[in-house]
Image (tube, rainbow, N blue to C red):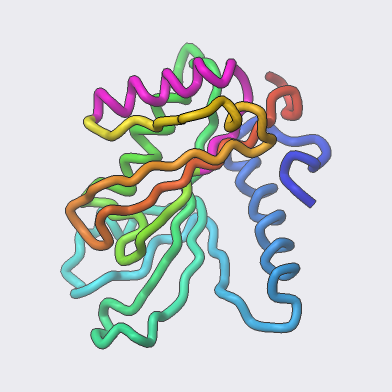
Amino acid sequence: GSLRNSANLPEGENALNTKLLDCLRVAAREVRPAGNYPLLRAECPPLPYGESEETSRRLKATPDFVWGYVDASEPNPLLDAREFTIECKRLRHASQSWNYNESYVEDGIQRFLDVGKKYGIGVPSGVMVGYWQAMDADDILKAVNVTAQKGHIPILNVSTDSWKLAAVSNLHHSLSRQFPVSPVELRHLWVDLRGKCGRL
């Protein structure tokens, strides 16, 4: 089943992540029913990439989800960890205490660029999941892009309105960063949960 078809969806990000984890585990088994597949981990620190002098800040970072494997073609055993990173954030009107759309950029996208956190180091792509709980599509896109521009991050460009009509919007952009792999292709999957969560 999909997240959108789950009954009684919670409102909070951590509870939604738990539901999404269930969906991802079921999907992984459906794709590889008879074989082994990489283990999906939730809220786990990343593996070291390179020498052990990496900052404790990075090793304490906890992406929402990582799918990891060992790249046997990498000659350096200290650089052979490959972790596909998924970070999730809520998209909706700001509350009195929190601006969700700003957080999507500052506590989400920025982690794929931050030399202290280095989400997705060593891999050419990553994913941001947006739990789209409220607001018009154009308003959310504008809010995310305004925050991105303030942080000197390229905006999400869209060429057609088709992304607004999908149950899961698929946006993406290419980002330059100061660690491998650069540029990184960051996909944005905005799951339309408007009217499907608890107390909105």
Query: In terms of depth relative to the viewer, which is nearer, 31 or 11?
Result: 31
Query: In terms of depth relative to the viewer, which is nearer, 8 or 80?
Result: 80
Query: In terms of depth relative to the viewer, which is nearer, 125 or 36?
Result: 125
Q: Is residue 22 above or below residue 151?
A: below
Answer whether residue 134 is magenta in the image: yes
Q: In the picture, residue 56 is in which quadrant? A: bottom left
Query: In terms of depth relative to the viewer, which is nearer, 15 or 160?
Result: 160
The quadrant of the image that shows the C terminus is top right
Q: Position of residue 80 (x, y in %)?
A: 33, 79
Which is the main secondary structure of the residues drawn in magenta?
Answer: helix
Answer whether residue 50 is magenta in the image: no
**Most distant residue in the right direction:** 7
Task: Tell me where the magenta segment starts and ends, as one range.
Answer: 129-151
Q: Is residue 169 above or below residue 20?
A: above
Q: Is residue 161 above or below residue 50?
A: above
Q: Position of residue 190 (x, y in %)?
A: 57, 36
Q: In the picture, residue 14 is in which quadrant? A: top right
Q: Position of residue 2 (x, y in %)?
A: 75, 48
Q: Position of residue 55 (x, y in %)?
A: 20, 59
Write the residue at 27% across / 53% down.
183
